[in-house]
Image (cartoon, rainbow, N blue to C red):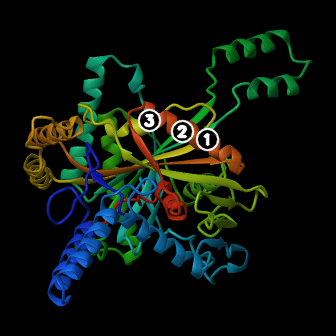
Amino acid sequence: MARSFVYPRPRPRGLVGRRLEQHEQIFVGLAGLLVLVLLVSVPTWPLKLLTACTVALFTSWAVWMPYKGRTYLRWWEIRRTYKRALRHGDLLYRSRAPRAGRRMSGQPRPVPTPAGIPELEWMSAPTAFGELAVLLQTTERMFVATLEVEAERDFGGLDEPERESLIAAFEHLLRTTAESGRIRRLQWTLRVVPTDPTGHERDVAERRDRTTPDWLRDSYDQLQQRVAISAEDRRLFVTLGIPYSQALVAEARNFNSLAEGFARVVGAEAETFIRSLPLSQLRLVRTLDEATLCSLVHSLYDPTHQIDDSLGLNRQNLWPAEVDGRNPRHIKTRTWSNPHPWFSATAWFRELPATAVRVNFLAPLLLWIDHTIRTVTIVMDLEESERALSRALSDLTNEIGQGPTGMVQNPREKAARSHAAQTVEELGEGYAGITLTGYVTVSAPSEKELAQVKDTVRGAIIKSRMRPEWLETEHWRAFAATLPLALGLIRSR
């Protein structure tokens, strides 16, 4: 999915300039070549002008004119991919887990993944912090492993000096991760599921033993009043992405098998990252092994499934019983344990808040919306400072060169140039270079409720100075971007 941009603003990155994407520039170039051919081959001048103007007008309309929230050229590839997947039957997935069986060694046989999700090879890495599931995505050429973390302090409740120190600590984490080690991609996933704040109280009232001594009942009541009950279960996960490389293969050959070597190397990188988490005031909750990772993925498809309920889950039955992506406005999922389907839709953060805060790309994770089941994901590629600085200088040069020459300037273009200059200054001071994108997936038990939730989430995103774009006809593959697989960014290496 070609939906990525360089912080702090979304911007096309073509062969020449930063106004159009690469495929749009190629389309304009081919149209110009066609105009030249028509001017040479058409016999009379009236026909030359008519055909040349027709091609020029169609090209301008297809590339620049707004069309259903995008442009016709951008819709063309999206619709072509959707129709091809619909024609081949890829958008209706039914799990083969009941008929897959096991190998002679006892390992579950692999089950095909839903559309939009690459084939996965599972490995297990023992670490000092617990067992860690390592997944190799063969088509993406990347190893991924997931951790559950927890912030030690609430960012929104801090005063200005504490915020600055926390921002500096987080920047240090990104810079050290980018400059040392093999981790080149991070995915921050926030899973929010509404809970019943009075559920525990009602359960106690129903199951209370009246023969219990008064002092014990009073003690428990006092304890219950002091415990804060949240109306939302907010869980934060970070997925580490390590590209497949020859150096990694060479190091993995030192072990008994390549699979064991890959797992050991990725596990060592994860241990190094975990030890650096306290520097950014993050705390490791647990490492996700095969069962807990499968439970997390299963809960994303079925919100009624508890994330901590990992009993009996493995790489074979983590996928739902059915995933229907034929509707262009949502996907419908049904799991084995829940006969009622869930409807989900995914939006892309087309524009993040362009402010002076250096880590404001985490703003989507701070969205607070009541009574909404959602998964917010920020995927970022980390680069060395020198390479990021070189690209930022190129962006700043293009911004200045393409700036307006008149007296009246577009304030958005002016802000874009100032932020490009700010990015160059920050990279010059040693901050990490980041290419990132963000997604949010919302779920509801019916189509009507899903439409209401989409409106609610859209309003909250706009109030947070961001701009969403619902990925119509792409929900079947956009949903994979919010899974803990570090997808959603173009593979640039």
For badge 2, the amino acid type reads: Val
Residue at the (40%, 42%) spot, across then down = 467
Which quarter shows the N terminus?
bottom left
The x, y position of residue 86, in whole percent, is 58, 75
Q: Write down the residue under mark 3.
A: 462
**Disc 1 versus disc 2: distance between alpha carbons?**
6 Å
Q: Nearer the viewer, residue 123 or 169?
A: 169
**Disc 2 versus disc 3: distance between alpha carbons?**
9 Å
Residue at the (68%, 76%) spot, across then down = 96
User: Which mark sits nearer the N-terminus, 1 or 3?
Assistant: 1
For badge 3, the amino acid type reads: Ile
Q: Is residue 247 left or right of residue 397?
A: right
Instruction: Determine the secondary structure under disc 2.
Output: helix
User: Which mark sits nearer the N-terminus, 2 or 3?
Assistant: 2
Which quarter shows the C terminus?
bottom left
Q: Write down the residue under mark 2.
A: 457
Q: Is residue 388 left or right of residue 56?
A: left
Q: Write down the residue under mark 1.
A: 453
Q: Quadrant of residue 336?
A: bottom right
The x, y position of residue 165, in whole percent, is 25, 25
Is residue 480 depicted above or below 300 in this figure?
below
Q: Is residue 239 visible?
A: yes
The x, y position of residue 268, in whole percent, is 33, 57
For badge 1, the amino acid type reads: Val
Instruction: Determine the secondary structure under disc 1.
Output: helix
